[in-house]
Image (cartoon, helix red, strand yellow):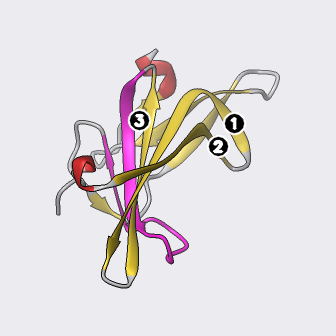
Amino acid sequence: MRTPDLSRYLPHRVAEAEFEGETVPGLTAEFYRRPEGERIATVGRYLVGGRELFRAWGYADEEHCRHSAVSGHPPVDGCPVVELERDPGGSVVGLRVRTPGGEWAGTRHLE
């Protein structure tokens, strides 16, 4: 399995990224699409300060991502394990994602 080559996809939209219904400060999501027969293949690319944190991909008709990859790590099956980081008052201040080796990478580490 390989991380999708975005040059083979068409840009679909760019947005502030949300997880669990909350916007994550500094995290941008770029979404890409391309037809694959009767289906639409999709890729979500999540960036902090222009640096990629992770990608998730699959098909538009699927509820969850089929595969994902934390930047600098090999792709895995399924969606990434993601957690919101909060300050002591409960406000979202970042996001972290688990690498295949079990370490955490996050928005606060890329700023």
Residue displayed at 37% across by 48% down: 55
Residue displayed at 20% across by 49% down: 74
Other residues around mark 3 within 10 Å, as few (<14) / some (14–19) / many (≥20): some
Other residues around mark 2 within 10 Å, as few (<14) / some (14–19) / many (≥20): some
Which residue carries the number 3 mark? 104
- Label 2 sits on what residue type? Glu
How far apart marks 1 and 3 lie (CA) works out to 20 Å
Task: Give the camera-side residue of 97 and 13.
Answer: 13
Which residue carries the number 1 mark? 23
How far apart marks 2 and 1 lie (CA) works out to 4 Å
Q: Secondary structure at mark 1?
A: strand
Q: Residue furthest top?
A: 111
* Mark before the other along the chain sequence, 2 or 1: 2
56 magenta-colored: yes
Residue extent of the magenta highlight: 50-70
Q: Secondary structure at mark 3?
A: strand
Residue contact between numbered discs 2 and 1, judged by CB atoms under 8 Å:
yes
